[in-house]
Image (tube, coloured by chain):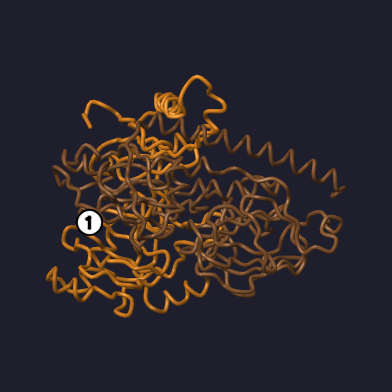
Amino acid sequence: MPSNLLYKISSYGDHAILIELGNMIDEKVNQKVICVFHHLQNKKIAGIKDIIPAYCSVTVVYDVAVIRKTHHNISAAGSMELQIRNVLQDVNFEQPILSRQIEIPVCYDAEFALDIQQMAIQKKLIAEEIIRIHSSKTYRVYMIGFIPGFAYMASVDSQIATPRKRQPRQFVPAGSVGIAGFQTGIYPLQSPGGWNIIGQTPLKLFDPANEQPCLLHPGDEVRFVPVTKKEFDKIKSKQ
Amino acid sequence: MSIRIIKAGFADTVQDLGRYGFQHLGINPGGAMDAVAAQVANMLTGNDIYEAVIEFHFPASSIMFEKDCLIAISGADFGVTTNHQSIPLNTPVIVAKKSVLEFSKYISGCRCYLAVRNGIDIPLWLNSYSTHVKAHAGGYKGRILHKDDLLITRKSASYQSVLKKNRHDVLHWKADVAEFYQQPNIIRICTGKEYGELTDQSKSLLTTADFLVTPHSDRMGYRLVSVILQRNQNTEIISSAVTRGVIQLFPNGQLVILMADHQTAGGYPVIAHVISADMPKLAQLNSNQTIQFQMIEAAGAEDLLWQQYQHLHQLQNACNLRLEEYFLHHALY
């Protein structure tokens, strides 16, 4: 994407539009993404079914029939693009949306830190150092995907950035905190997965019974707070 | 009163037209794989198109109706019977209390839908009845249907005067759905974001080769096997949202088509999209069948979807009219 453009709009199949705001994993680019996401959400354009922010793009899924019924002389794709361009005209990309600050308690004890020993050998660090480094930074939720509520957070310090495991686990326990490259994330549900697991949070990241089923949202800022097993159990029993 | 699962099927779930508005939280839309058949079944019973239906795969569940019901079945042909007598697809049928509905033999298609007049009374989860098996939420208890599950149906008319001593009554009209499933193995596509990265040879192979639907195909995606397709460059792709019908190119040169239960984001090259109007047809294909892709413009794809919608809308009006007449004629309320 040419750098003199704020964004690029193109159709994505026959019922979605892609808004690209860059082509790298970068905090500034993602701030623009979240900015576009919020503005489009607030406008409540008729016919939009989903607005999905990612690292450096926003995808808008729309209902062709709803739009064609109200805009007779134009395709749904054309009408959507016009409406989105109109909304984006008023957006001040330099004024980022204020992020929510969220603290996530994590127990890094050996029983939860399934891969920390292996990582320690690979990174020539002791486990305590990995924990200290992981919990001393604020991470940004760049996007949510893979499974309900799974937040892709970055950037992990290069000292502990570790590629995905060669052989993914069949069952990663719910609440597991992992590292994949420069990303860190939490498994909201038990799931297969290849991230290096270094701890577990007692919090429920995903709860279908809640009106807000997911704890983390795109654009949030997250800190991991180390807790003992005892504190972990206490928090868990209250969930 | 309710319908009871008296024998479990292989993977039967409650579905509707999908759960939208939550993909930014990683919650995928799900919904009926064949959205046309799900709508047709609802329309034939006079329901709103967004009512819950049951989606069956073969071997499918058997059902006992614990009260008189007006039902309709659309989609795959699994030799449906009530009380051991065949009943037609795409036709409203009134079944008497204690009737047993069975899917006796596999004939064609892959997914079949049952609608019951006035719908199934289950709670909505995030505005949808669709079952999200991974999240254990939505549909019936967030899972596939088991033996002895009871699905409460909403109150409807008494059909005693029509049934008299019969166990069921087949109404006299049929929805013509042939148009939605023409040329079942020709799947129309439009170009995807990374289409331009394919080699010229791969571009031409995409629309000339046969693609086999492998047994590793399910509600999440159809994995295809064919000639190996290649890109000119192997640049990493940054993950972004993916939608139903996206065709991704795996690093091994094979393709996957994302279906109803697809993940919300992906990092594989998107080389094409199956056009929305052909997704119902694709949903009725089984593993070991082959497909060929035919490239069309996105604008044309949108027009085809709009035509499909208009056709369904006409069908809905016709169904409502017929049902109204029938109810009046038989004094059903």
Q: Answer above or below: position of A158 versus A22.
A: below
Q: Answer above or below: position of B172 versus A151.
A: above
Residues A154 and A192: in front is A192
Which residue is at 45% across, 66% downward? A203
> Percent x, y for residue B176?
59, 42
A107 displayed left or right of B316? left
What's the residue type where badge 1 is placed? Answer: Phe
Residues A153 and B1: in front is B1
Quadrant of the image for the N terminus of chain B? Answer: bottom right
The answer for which chain carries disc 1 is A
Q: Give the quadrant of residue A61.
A: top left
The colour applied to the residues of chain A in this rendering is orange
> Percent x, y for residue B241?
36, 46
Which residue is at 42% across, 79% downward? A230
User: In the structure shown, which secondary structural element does the residue marked by tag 1 occupy?
Assistant: loop
Total label count? Answer: 1
- Mark 1 residue crowding within 10 angstroms, few (<14) / some (14–19) / many (20+): some
> Percent x, y for residue B27?
46, 54
B4 displayed left or right of A175? right
Residue lying farthest to the top in this orientation: A73
Residues B23 and B192: in front is B192
Q: Answer above or below: position of A93 versus B21.
A: above
Q: Give the quadrant of residue A54.
A: top left
> Percent x, y for residue B160?
85, 59
Which residue is at 15% across, 47% downward? B234
Q: Which residue is mark 1?
A: A182
Which residue is at 46% across, 57% downward? A215
Residue lying farthest to the left in this orientation: A124
Residues B122 and A3: in front is B122
Q: Give the quadrant of residue B301.
A: top left
Chain depicted in brown? B
